[in-house]
Amino acid sequence: MAQLLTLSKAARIVGVKRDILQVKIRQGELNTFEGLLNLDELIRLYPHTQVEDDFMLERVSNIKANAIHKLRDDVDSGNTSILSNKIQEMRQALAEERKNIQILSKLLDSIRVELNERGQIKQTELSSVIEQTLASINTQTKDVVPISYSEENNFYTNNINLKPSSRHFPIDTSDTILEAALKSGLSINYACSDGSCGKCRTKVTSGMTRQTKYHEYRLSENEKNQGTVLSCSYTALTDLELEADIATKSSDLENRKINANVKMIAHNNIATVITLKTPSNSRFRFLAGQQTKVTFPNKKSAVFPIASCPCEDRMIQIHIPSDSNQLTDDLNINDPIEIEGPYGDFLLNIDSHNPIVFIAYETGFSHIKSIIEQAIALDSTNNIYFYWISHSNSSFYFNNLCRAWMDAIDNFNYDSILIDNKTEGSEVKDSASHFYIQTALEYIDNSISHLTLYDFYLAVPNSMVDTSLQFLGARGVAKSQIMINSF
Ligand code: FES
């Protein structure tokens, strides 16, 4: 059977940059199979490739990255039996620590729920809540799964093929199937992500899995016999084929209200960035590009785009523009915040094979950040361009992150467009908006040729929408290639 590789892995194996392989794909010298490259074709094109060496080097480098300093003496002395015993001891210790974290996390959630419901709680009642919760948790977690992968499978990356969509994604054995799918920008079914709801049930039609996290939800014997597993609690020991649907539009997701807590507040020139954390048993499922209604402790509400990646476990990031400062004035770390949703269909078209241009004006970055991360995670062969527009240098408030993306990812290009508006009539808001976006689009048109080849995602003020549509339409870009989220 043909061995298929992601573009990044293929580039590493043959020792060339990703964009060189992208050129060969465009010129028809290399074929892609649903975004993956065939190893045999690569070897034909690059006959010097030492495949075995590469896989061995990869394995060694992964082992090095995961090595623990305590073991170094035994490694150097080559005493494999001491080494093996120590690894076993550490796996056991890690399993125990995971169990303790689970217990503490559930205990905190129970106390938080009681406090939310009662407003205040007496010391004796609190003791009783703690005792009852601990008793119930101890029963649930007594069979916590020890970490005991066979060494030969411990450091591999496997590939997962989803049916019926035929989407592929890589998985490290340190990730669950759900974590790996979300990191690759694919939203397979889930709700709690901690093994209690059963919504992530998926049928494995080929390959081997292993349970890596305790799950409270009990699969029936029939489900087990049919190869059903919980994607939030299992990893892949080999390449897998799974039956799992992918959410691609807002109607695929359930609307929920969740009580989260403020974990971080950071102010910059044009926005306040807050990071929220949801309870361990209530994950907020959303698609990159969607929005959430946020209700603050002062009972004021507003809808904001979710700027974090759906893969970031329980963390939700929101950027609140400075003109809405009254919402966050009294906000403190650990304050409760209700989030509701998700809403909106400003989503990445994952079926399109066009290169992508993202355009954001100032805090429009928060509308587009998670979609950029999804486009990067999908590891497509297409180029991605991000143009961030502002009239003030201090408004590129995540400039370092964008530069880091550009440094790390061969097909990602970032350009901040600073527009100094000295035109007559610029004090009139709409006129200034027209000038900003017109100037920026002209710059983009000069930077990349053939705009008709691209998909455009714009997050710009309402006053810039008409000019944007007219400009792109006049250059032959079809309406179906233009996605706009205005604010
Ligand atoms: S997501 Fe709830 S059990 Fe897996």
Image (cartoon, helix red, strand yellow):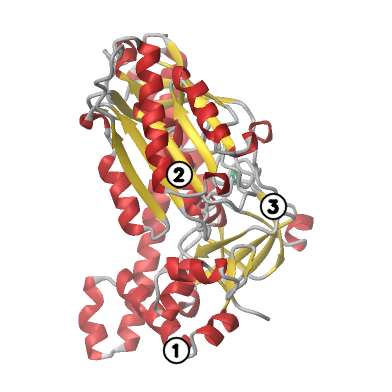
Which of the 4 quarters of the picture holds residue 49?
A: bottom left
> Where residue 267 sits: x, y (%)?
23, 26
Which label sits on residue 372?
Answer: 2
| Label 2, label 1: how far apart the Cα atoms are | 34 Å
Residue that appears at 21% across and 30% down: 394
Residue that appears at 40% across and 36% down: 442
| Label 3, label 1: how far apart the Cα atoms are | 36 Å
First along the sequence among labels 2 and 1: 1
Between disc 3 and disc 1, the foreground one is: 1
Which label sits on residue 50?
Answer: 1
Nearer to us in this view, 316 or 5: 5
Q: Residues within 10 Å of mark 2 (few under 14, many from 20)?
A: many
Would you place residue 235 above or below residue 338 in this image? below
> Where residue 118 sits: x, y (%)?
44, 13
Can residue 13 be seen from the camera position used here? yes
Nearer to us in this view, 38 or 177: 38
Would you place residue 444 above or below residue 438 in this image? below
Which of the 4 quarters of the picture holds residue 57?
A: bottom left
Describe the element under mark 3 as helix, strand or loop.
loop
- Residue that badge 3 annotates: 244
Can residue 120 be seen from the camera position used here? no
Q: As shown in the figure, which amino acid type bears the numbered disc 2?
A: Ile
Describe the element under mark 1 as helix, strand or loop.
loop
Between disc 2 and disc 3, the foreground one is: 2
